[in-house]
């Protein structure tokens, strides 16, 4: 296994040499000033960093040290930062914790203590990385591009797998944005025609007077502007699959012509007299109730039965429990990579809003809201406002496991602070955690407290400052 990377930001060469000797189990990246440190952090993505607060050009103060700390925390928020402070400089240590540092160590360094802090930081970083990978990993699905943990949607995927190996016509029924084209592509890609063309046409997006030529093609001179012979979508899909999206919008005249093709497997281009044999598998889709259209005479009964040898009904996102949050995490990971952002997750209000929203636009709506949120969010966590959703009412008996854990964690944290009369050292002891961990939890949950002593007051100010600045 590769060694964990340890970033050192220290201008004292003697201390740098001591670090080299003290941490043979780490891959050290040694820098002496803020610009070097930021460049190294961006390139190497270290697990842990040690920062001296007294950096040039302010070696006798802490201005440059804090500027470096805050810049590194913004740039690599999951990196664990330990600050090196002067002996007895407790106020600066607590301010550093409030600004995002993981822990602190006083000079002169106790190497054994520092090794312990570094080991804990490395293990925590590895654990958080693993948790992040697990949270971002798409749920196992038999079909590429379909991310789901819903039994209803997994059943659809298994049906598509079985149908792909046959040559029957498939009709996909589902609301707009439910993934009909992704499933149509799966029918093609999982079947024997996978290496042949997959041609898609939206019957509702093309004007009626152009749709016939798009489907069947035309000969040169067939109409004004037909300056050359052009093959249509059906002919282009020969040996492969033709996906007819929004088939319910197909005009009645074209329904007759399409039916003839399905019955005889031949077409005639507009303006042509030659019949052209075409071997095409048809997958169609609509968000309409075709049975009702057939009953009202707006869709041909014989064409309907030709198209739906097998009908697959796709559930809307609101009927796929847990999938909205699963997809939101997937889109967060994808858009973080795409736009170079480093947003870490969702606030509890955002999770509640995502889980409670009806998603009338289904997966497409969720994707678009997530894209905007990742691009526009100012904080490290996406909030309901970033998604332009009203904050959801938190159900105290909700079944979302992560939300339940967050509620329980916040409740225990508040009880510990109340029982300790706001004294952070006592609260940390009651919870069985270190004070740096307590500060982190207070910041994460936005929990304020009434300080019990002077050191706690400084910590409270630091936590409050960090929370307010995001």
Image: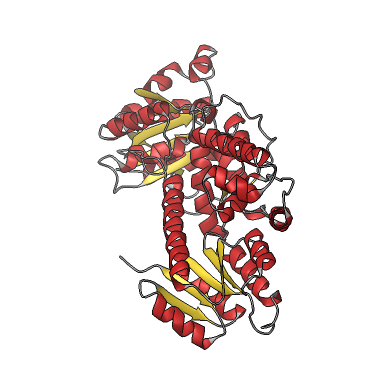
Relative to residue 337, is residue 123 drawn left or right? left
Please name the residue shown 63% across and 73% down the image.
Answer: 68
How many numbered circles does the render carry? Answer: 0
Please name the residue shown 47% across and 67% down the image.
Answer: 113
Extreme-bottom residue of the structure: 13
Between 254 and 44, the one lying in front of the other is: 44
Extreme-top residue of the structure: 295
Relative to 359, say whether 49 is above or below.
below
Q: Look at the image and tell me whether residue 209 can be seen.
A: no
Please name the residue shown 48% across and 46% down the image.
Answer: 330
Between 206 and 88, the one lying in front of the other is: 88
Relative to 103, say whether 85 is above or below.
below
Between 392 and 282, the one lying in front of the other is: 392
The percent coordinates of residue 161 (x first, y second) are 30, 34
Please name the residue shown 38% across and 19% down the image.
Answer: 305
Quadrant in the picture for the N terminus: bottom left
Between 217 and 75, the one lying in front of the other is: 75
Q: Kindly indicate the quadrant of the structure image that contains residue 394.
A: top right
The percent coordinates of residue 180 (x first, y second) are 46, 35
Relative to residue 198, is residue 341 drawn left or right? right
Quadrant in the picture for the C terminus: bottom right
- State the colouring used for the structure image: secondary structure
The percent coordinates of residue 376 (x first, y second) are 67, 53
Q: Look at the image and tell me whether residue 426 can be seen.
A: yes
């Amino acid at each position: 296994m590769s060694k964990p990377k340890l970033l050192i930001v220290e201008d004292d060469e003697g201390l740098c040499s001591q670090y080299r000797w003290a941490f043979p189990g780490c891959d050290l990246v040694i820098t002496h000033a803020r610009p070097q440190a930021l460049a190294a952090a961006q390139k190497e993505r270290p697990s842990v960093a040690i920062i001296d607060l007294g950096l040039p050009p302010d070696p006798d103060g802490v201005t440059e040290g804090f500027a470096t700390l805050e810049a590194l925390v913004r740039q690599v928020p999951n990196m664990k930062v330990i600050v090196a402070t002067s002996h007895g400089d407790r106020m600066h240590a607590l301010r550093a914790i409030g600004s995002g540092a993981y822990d602190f160590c006083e000079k002169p360094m106790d190497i054994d203590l520092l090794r312990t802090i570094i080991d804990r930081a490395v293990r925590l970083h590895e654990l958080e990385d693993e948790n992040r990978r697990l949270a971002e990993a798409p749920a196992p699905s038999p079909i590429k591009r379909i991310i789901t943990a819903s039994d209803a949607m997994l059943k659809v995927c298994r049906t598509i797998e079985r149908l792909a190996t046959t040559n029957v016509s498939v009709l996909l029924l589902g609301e707009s944005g439910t993934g009909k084209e992704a499933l149509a592509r799966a029918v093609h890609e999982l079947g024997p025609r996978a290496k042949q063309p997959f041609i898609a046409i939206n019957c509702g997006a093309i004007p009626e007077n152009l749709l016939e030529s798009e489907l069947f093609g035309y000969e040169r001179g067939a109409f004004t502007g037909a300056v050359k012979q052009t093959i249509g979508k059906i002919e282009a899909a020969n040996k492969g699959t033709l996906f007819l999206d929004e088939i319910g919008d197909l005009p009645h005249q074209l329904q007759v012509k399409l039916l003839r093709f399905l019955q005889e497997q031949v077409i005639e281009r507009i303006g042509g007299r030659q019949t052209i044999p075409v071997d095409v598998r048809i997958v169609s889709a609509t968000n309409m109730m075709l049975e009702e259209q057939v009953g009202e005479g707006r869709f041909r009964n014989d064409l309907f039965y030709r198209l739906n040898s097998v009908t697959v009904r796709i559930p809307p996102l609101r009927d796929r429990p847990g999938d909205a949050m699963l997809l939101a995490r997937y889109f967060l990971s994808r858009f973080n990579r795409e736009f170079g952002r480093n947003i870490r997750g969702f606030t509890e209000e955002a999770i509640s809003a995502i889980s409670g929203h009806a998603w009338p636009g289904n997966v497409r709506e969720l994707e678009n809201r997530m894209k905007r949120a990742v691009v526009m969010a100012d904080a490290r966590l996406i909030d309901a406002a970033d998604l332009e959703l009203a904050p959801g009412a938190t159900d105290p008996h909700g079944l979302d496991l992560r939300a339940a854990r967050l509620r329980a964690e916040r409740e225990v944290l508040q009880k510990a602070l109340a029982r300790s009369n706001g004294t952070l050292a006592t609260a940390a002891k009651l919870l069985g955690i270190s004070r740096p961990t307590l500060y982190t939890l207070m910041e994460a949950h936005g929990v304020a407290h009434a300080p019990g002593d002077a050191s706690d007051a400084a910590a409270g100010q630091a936590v409050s400052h960090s929370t307010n600045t995001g």
